[in-house]
Amino acid sequence: MSIILAIESSCDDTSAAVIIDGIVKSNVTATQKIHEKYGGVVPEVASRKHQSNIIPVVDEALKNANIDVNNLSAIAVTKGPGLLGSLIVGVSFAKGLALSLGIPIIEVNHMMAHVLAHYADDPKPNFPFLCLTVSGGHTQIVRVNSPFEMIVIGSTIDDAAGEAFDKTGKIMGLKYPAGPIIDKLAQTGNPVYSFTEPNIEGLNFSFSGLKTSILYFLKAQLKENPNFIDENLADICASVQDRIVSILLNKIKNAAEQTGIHEIAIAGGVSANSGLRKAIKQAGAELNWNTYIPEFQYCTDNAGMIGIAAYFKYMKNDFADLTLVPSARMIMH
Ligand code: KG4
Ligand code: ZN
């Protein structure tokens, strides 16, 4: 039997999970509300918050899974990519605990873990599958050949999809992170405003032009009517979301066509978006795809997905040692 304690601290969520024989038994996340007032994540503040959150979060994860710390088989931790100061807290904690318990450490790539989060749920995608990984820091189409072999076949050339939500939300005066707020407001509005779709070659994405066109559109409207945003907020949100979703959907459609792969998954914080979830399901029904949409708890950053990714490594005896250091720009391999 394997009992893995997993730790995630790459950005602004401190999370711990217990995974027993590949099944997530507990998954506890402390979200750092403090960044709201700054309109984005402040790295130094995030790092300090991780320090105060990590012990209570780990304690709760162990308690919820009914596991004594002495019964753990291994500690899994996010090595990167992410904010260096945030990663250091998780990695240092994991190393200290592993050393004191005399058990191995498993290093995990955060982006691979977002993809492998699908193995926490049923049905599980069959290899090879395509995964659209959309978060606050990344936007990628990944060809997943196995739990250990992932090839990025498309990515953003500027902002990430989550940033597109967060930055346009900021322009409208919404709190950080604006993604979930736009999602909620969009449900009561209609996509009546049309923002141009960028023409980017191949499977790559761009979102910075969209942000600029929304900024100019709102500036022009506010000149005519200073209350334009307040009076039309739901419709503006629906229009922004509609465009972001169509950009993502068109690229994943191209990727499916080019690769001939019809196993299609979405992952990362933006995969919680109701418009994207609906659009992927609809496209799947039309184009004969098997679609995989993660449970909400596995969309945004969480240690459950780190533990699932670590379990694959545990089964291969693929362990790190105490020389492990975080890697802010870690790439997939
Ligand atoms: O994966 P994640 O928790 O952290 C990163 O690794 O970046 O993703 C966070 C991002 C934020 O940009 C947030 O606004 C976005 O995911 N997000 C959403 C929704 N929930 C979270 N965007 C759109 N709709 C949502 N429901
Ligand atoms: Zn993430």
Image (cartoon, rainbow, N blue to C red):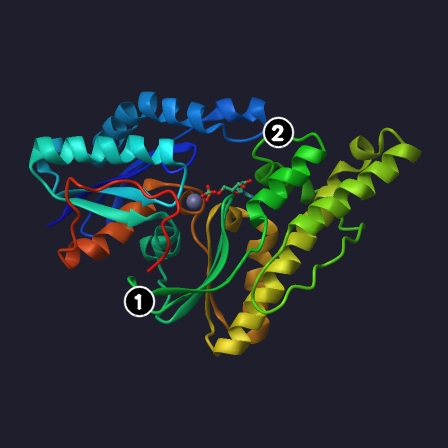
Name the side, left or right, on which 292 lies relative to 246: left
Badge count: 2
Residue 226 pos. (x, y %)? 87, 29
Residue positioned 22% across, 36% down in the render: 65
Crowding around mark 1 (Cα neighbors within 10 Å: few <14, some 14 to 19, many 20+) is few
Badge 2 is on which residue? 175
Question: Badge 1 is on which residue?
Answer: 146
Q: Is there any visible trace of residue 105 in the rendered image?
A: yes
* Real-space CA distance between mark 1 and mark 2, rounded to the nearest whole angstrom: 38 Å
Of the image marks 1 and 2, the number of the one nearer the N terminus? 1
Q: Is residue 194 left or right of residue 42?
A: right
Say which amino acid is labelled 1.
Ser
The residue sitting at the right extreme is 224
Q: Nearer the viewer, residue 7 or 122?
A: 7
**What residue is rendered at 49% in x and 58% in y?**
140
Could you tell me which secondary element the residue under label 2 belongs to? loop
Q: Quadrant of the C terminus?
A: bottom left
